[in-house]
Amino acid sequence: MSAGQIRFMIEKTRESYPVEACGALFGELSGSEARIRKIVAFRNTLESTVRFQIDPEDFLKTLFEAEIEGLQHLGFFHSHSAGTRPSATDIKYMKLWPETIWLIISSINYEVAAYRMINGDLHEVRIDVEAG
Ligand SMILES: [Zn+2]
């Protein structure tokens, strides 16, 4: 992903603080590599500081647009007002969306980490940041 995409997510995290920011990641998959091409931020319909929820209609609309653009849904991002480890709730939802990338940003220090659930096990995903 690009430095600009990280900046975008940090900006959204700042804007919605203390409510968790959230959004979806779209792009291309090649082998074990995911290339993020587009990030869409959504309103956290729960207005919660510890959980997030995306309006399903907003999400479907975005999913449809991305498909037209030839992009596939790769995952989600959301912010935590603590560290970047997934919460118990996150883990529960990650199990419902296996293989999906979950990117978490800390609203304390803007650290970013990404995870995937593979066969019921939590794996950290390496993030390569390109300039731009
Ligand atoms: Zn979370």
Image (tube, rainbow, N blue to C red):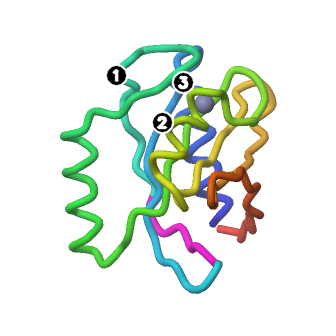
Q: Secondary structure at mark 2?
A: strand
Q: What secondary structure predominates along the stretch shown in magenta?
A: strand
Left-right relation of 103 to 100 = right
CA distance separating discs 2 and 1: 10 Å
CA distance separating discs 1 and 3: 10 Å
Q: Residue at x 21, y 73 (%)?
A: 68
For label 1, the crowd category at 10 Å Cα-Cα, with few meaning under 14, some 14 to 19 and many 20 or more, is some
Question: Sequence-wise, which precedes: disc 2 or disc 1?
Answer: 2
Residue placed under numbered mark 2 in the picture? 22
Whether ligand 1 has any atom under 8 Å from the Cβ at mark 2 is answered as no
Q: Secondary structure at mark 3?
A: loop
Q: Quadrant of residue 107?
A: top right
Amino acid type, residue under disc 3 in the picture: Glu
Q: In the rendered structure, which segment of residues is drawn in magenta?
A: 33-38
Q: Secondary structure at mark 1?
A: loop
Evaluate if marks 2 and 1 touch, with contact meaning CB atoms under 8 Å apart: no
| Residue 63, percent from left and from top | 27, 58
Amino acid type, residue under disc 2 in the picture: Cys
Amino acid type, residue under disc 1 in the picture: Thr
Q: Residue at x 62, y 48 (%)?
A: 103
The N terminus lies in quadrant: bottom right
Whether ligand 1 has any atom under 8 Å from the Cβ at mark 3 is answered as yes
Residue placed under numbered mark 3 in the picture? 20
- The quadrant of the picture showing ligand 1 is top right
From the viewer's perspective, is residue 42 above or below residue 114?
A: above
Left-right relation of 60 to 78 = left
Evaluate if marks 2 and 3 touch, with contact meaning CB atoms under 8 Å apart: yes
From the viewer's perspective, is residue 31 above or below residue 25?
A: below
Q: Quadrant of residue 2?
A: bottom right
Residue placed under numbered mark 1 in the picture? 45
